[in-house]
Every structure is written in C-alpha cells, then in structure tokens.
Image (tube, rainbow, N blue to C red):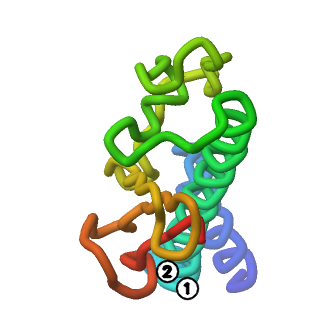
Amino acid sequence: MVAAVRRGSVAARRRVVRRGGERGFTLLELLVVIVIIGLLAAYVGPKYFAQLGKSEVTIARAQIEAFEKSLDTYRLDVGHYPSSDEGLAALLVAPPAAGAKWNGPYLKKAVPLDPWGHAYQYRSPGSKGEFEIVSTGRDGQPGGSGEDADITSQ
C-alpha cells in the first residue's frame, strides 16, 4: 500500500508538470548560457574589431594603387603627372595644362575619401618620387602608429 501511495504521488507530480504542457529552463540554466555567450563575445569581439581595422588599411592601400595606375596612364597620355594644385581631380576633368593630350577621365567614379572619411593628399613632386599619395589614417593627422599611421604610395 505504501508503494501505491508513492506511485500515486509521483504520478500526481508528473501530472502537475504536464498539465500546463510547458517545460521551461531553470534560472541557473539561463545564467550558465548567458555567461557562456558573454565569454564568447569577450573572446571574439576584440579579434573581430582588430580585423576590421586591418581591412580599412587594406582598402586604403588598394585605392592608392588604383590612383597610381590611373596617374601612370595620365602621364603616358599627357607627358607628366598632374601638379599638386591640379591634384587627383585631374584624373576626372582635364586641367588646362594638359591640353588636347588628355584622354580621360582616368577614373570611373569621383575620387573617393579614404576608409576613415578623410581626403587623400596628392603631392607632386613627392618626398621620394615624382608624386606621392597619402592617407593620414584613422586619426586624420600626419604621423601616428597602428591604425593612425599614414599610408603612402611610396
């Protein structure tokens, strides 16, 4: 008879749980899952944002290389690189000094800003060559290190 009472009480408990048809997670289980997600975010987050910074530097280098190729084509047509005053705009609109030799536009679109939203600086003659294209990096100031470092064509 005692066994029947025990069986009945277990069955009664099961009926109570099943009657609502809902089975949920305990507070402890939810806290463990939240802690695991937090640990993963703490581990992956910094690595993700470091890669984001590296990709911006890669984009800036690729854009500078595209400008270099367009400037070389300009030089083949006109005979010289644009002056510092003419700048990269000479790749889109014929400067007066280019005359009839200009066979552009040498870029498909307007000169873009660097990945950090700053204008590229063009100098002719450059510090180490016939021209120099500079992105001042994330901080927009000359010099710097890491993501704030200048990216140049030289």
On screen, 96 above or below 43? above
Say the numbered circle drawn on residue 46: 2
> Residue 20 or 127: which is nearer the viewer?
127
- Image spot of residue 76 (x, y percent): 74, 36
Q: Amino acid at mark 1?
A: Tyr
Dots 2, 1 in contact, CB < 8 A: yes
**Which residue lies at the image location 46% right of the left edge and 38% below the top edge?**
88
Q: Which residue is denoted by mark 1 in the rendering?
A: 43
- Image spot of residue 111 (x, y percent): 47, 33
| Number of numbered discs | 2
On screen, 45 above or below 123? below
> Residue 27 or 31: which is nearer the viewer?
31
Local crowd size for mark 1, using a 10 Å CA cut-off: few (<14), some (14–19), many (≥20): few
Q: Amino acid at mark 2?
A: Pro
Q: Secondary structure at mark 1?
A: helix
Q: In the displayed structure, does residue 47 sit left or right of residue 119? A: right
Quadrant location of the N terminus?
A: bottom right
Does residue 12 appear in this view? Answer: no
On screen, 104 above or below 91? above
Quadrant location of the C terminus?
A: bottom right
**Which residue lies at the image location 60% right of the left edge and 42% below the top edge?**
80
